[in-house]
Structure formats: structure tokens, C-alpha cells
């Protein structure tokens, strides 16, 4: 039967469907070749070979391979613990009724979903109101319990935007503000124990900076050396794209191959940093160079397909 050891002296195995028993004995109904239907030792993994490189993420393709070699335990990197909170008096938890001047806290909801997809343990500290003492307490708790701290909002120039002030007080600022769109008010730094990423308050800006900046940081800290963003491709713009020179622009687009096998891309529409539906309607970023202006239909652009974090 399949999987049994080959009898001593045998050079081939004939499938049962290609043999029949007759009065004269067993007759084969197929040509026999030496070595057929025999699996040799070492065909999958040779003795002394490297099975998996250090830093590869273990999943359904890797763990059964280890199991086939009888490996039941191995040393791995522990999961990153990430603390997340949102800031702002105007925020209301998803599912609660809105009062005048309130909006739903979709950023923390989106960030938590993405963190869980990335295999992180999440410490959700909720909504922190615009109060310095409350924000300081949240920073201190997050710094003491997590490897990475992610906040949403409070990194712009409003009167109640205390996040950068807390970072100056409790750690150090690596950089603050980037020449990208959307996502200019992004803060990065180090607390006493944890790394810190301050996402903008606008939902598209928060999701994009998490995807482009925080996601690779988490992969690096988790030891996932095989992780890469999808490679950028060239595509022809089917629709005009509005842009002003000065910032690297990540617009949301929908790309596909035409009848000639060439990539074409069109915009998802309004690219405002509040239009979160552009992610569900698109499948890529249209990456427009910092000093490039508006794009006319027919021009070539770079696109970056969404990875599994945003792909539906």
C-alpha cells in the first residue's frame, strides 16, 4: 500500500490499477520503468540541509513541513505586545450613539484589526480624553506593558494636541511630520521601554501611515526577516490624477490587466483623508513622486498592490 517500505530487491512499484490477477498469475498492463512510484529518502529534505531560514513566519506551509521531520518544538520569537489608544474629546466608541460634535473612533478599531492580522498581542487602552494627566497615565502604562505604543490623533497643531508634548517629556522624538500625503502629521520616537508611533487623526492618514511605516517596523521587531511590501509596478493611468508638487502621494486606485496584458489603473475617486471607502473600492496605491504634479490620462505611473492587510 502507499507509504509502505519497498521490499528488498525491488526496483519499481506498479500501481494496483495497472495490474490484474489471472489464472496464470499477475499480469501488468503498463510498461515498467526502474524507480517508478518509489520515493527516495532525501527527495524532500536532504540530510544536513537547511529546512527553514531564521526569521520566516510559521504558518500552514511551514509547520507541517517541520511536523513531517518529527520536529515538535523549536525556539521562536515571542509575539509583539502593542498598546493602542486614541485621543480626543470628540471621539465616541463604535456602537454608541453620537452626540453633537462627536465622531466614531474608527482609527483604533482599524488599527486593532490590522495588529491582530499581523499576529500581535494587543493592549487596547481605549479613548483618552484631551487631558494631559490622563494622557500621561496612558503613556506610562503603555510604556511599562508593551513593546510598541501606537496612538491616533493629537500629533497635529491643535491646542489640545498633547501627544508630541508627552513624547518630549517621557521619551524622545525621532521625527515628526513627513512629506507624504496623506499622513503628514506622523510622529515616531522612543519611550523609556517601548517604541512609539503617533498616527494622524484622519482615518485614511492613520491607515496609510500604519500600512507604509508601522507595518514594516512591527515585522522588523518581530524578527520576520522574510517580510516585504509588494513590489511596485508600472501602469497606465486611465483617469486624470490631481496632485500638487511637494509631497510623496499615495492615492488609492483600482488596477487590472487589459486585453493586451498591460496594467491599467484608475482612481477610486475623491482622495480626501476622510474618505475611507477608497480602501474598500481599490486594490492598490498609486504612488506619485514628490515633485510630480497632476497626471493626465494615458501617462505611466507606479502602483503598489495592497498586501493581505488591506486586500479583501
Image (spheres, grey):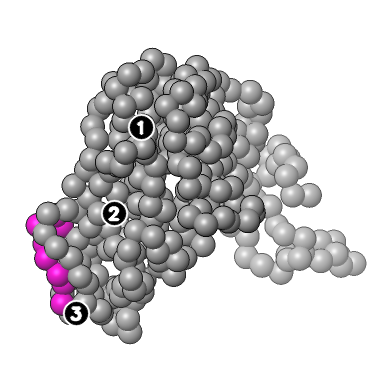
Which of marks 2 and 1 precedes in the sequence?
Answer: 1
* Residue that numbered label 3 is attached to: 297
**Tag count:** 3
What kind of element bears circle 2? loop
Residue drawn at x 68%, y 44% as measured from the top left? 10
Residue 293 belongs to the span the image colors magenta: yes
* Residue that numbered label 2 is attached to: 182
Which residues, given as a range, are shown in magenta? 289-296
Residue drawn at x 35%, y 45% as measured from the top left? 200
Which of marks 1 and 3 precedes in the sequence?
Answer: 1
Image quadrant of residue 31? bottom right
Looking at this view, is 304 or 93 the one in front? 93
Residue 198, percent across and down? 36, 36
Tag nearer the camera, 3 or 2:
2
Q: For this view, does 37 lie left or right of residue 203?
A: right
* Residue that numbered label 1 is attached to: 162
Q: CA distance from mark 3 to mark 2?
A: 22 Å
Residue 157, percent across and down? 27, 41
Amino acid at each position: 500500500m502507499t507509504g509502505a517500505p519497498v521490499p528488498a530487491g525491488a526496483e519499481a512499484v506498479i500501481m494496483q490499477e495497472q495490474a490484474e490477477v489471472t489464472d496464470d498469475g499477475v499480469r501488468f498492463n503498463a510498461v515498467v520503468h526502474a524507480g517508478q512510484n518509489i520515493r527516495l529518502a532525501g527527495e524532500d529534505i536532504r540530510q544536513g540541509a537547511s529546512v527553514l531560514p531564521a526569521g520566516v513566519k510559521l504558518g500552514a506551509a511551514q509547520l507541517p513541513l517541520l511536523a513531517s521531520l518529527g520536529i515538535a518544538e523549536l525556539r521562536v520569537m515571542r509575539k509583539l505586545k502593542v498598546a493602542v489608544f486614541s485621543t480626543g474629546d470628540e471621539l465616541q466608541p463604535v456602537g454608541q450613539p453620537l452626540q453633537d460634535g462627536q465622531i466614531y473612533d474608527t482609527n483604533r478599531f482599524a488599527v486593532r484589526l490590522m495588529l491582530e492580522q499581523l499576529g500581535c498581542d494587543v493592549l487596547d487602552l481605549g479613548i483618552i480624553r484631551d487631558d494631559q494627566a490622563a494622557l500621561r497615565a496612558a503613556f506610562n502604562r503603555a510604556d511599562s506593558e508593551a513593546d510598541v505604543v501606537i496612538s491616533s490623533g493629537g500629533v497635529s497643531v491643535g491646542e489640545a494636541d498633547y501627544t508630541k508634548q508627552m513624547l518630549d517629556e517621557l521619551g524622545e522624538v525621532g521625527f515628526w511630520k513627513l512629506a507624504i500625503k496623506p499622513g503628514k502629521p506622523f510622529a515616531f520616537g522612543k519611550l523609556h521601554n517601548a517604541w512609539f508611533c503617533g498616527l494622524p487623526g484622519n482615518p485614511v492618514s492613520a491607515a496609510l501611515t500604519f500600512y507604509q511605516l508601522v507595518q514594516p517596523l512591527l515585522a522588523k521587531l518581530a524578527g520576520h526577516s522574510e517580510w516585504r511590501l509588494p513590489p511596485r509596478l508600472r501602469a497606465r493611468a486611465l483617469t486624470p490624477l490631481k496632485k500638487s508638487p511637494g509631497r510623496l502621494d499615495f492615492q488609492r486606485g483600482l488596477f487590472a490587466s487589459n486585453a493586451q496584458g498591460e496594467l491599467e489603473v484608475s482612481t477610486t475617486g475623491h482622495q480626501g483623508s476622510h474618505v475611507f471607502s477608497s480602501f474598500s473600492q481599490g486594490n492598490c496605491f498609486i504612488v506619485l513622486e514628490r515633485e510630480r504634479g497632476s497626471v493626465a490620462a494615458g501617462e505611466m505611473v507606479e502602483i503598489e498592490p495592497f498586501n493581505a492587510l488591506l486586500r479583501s
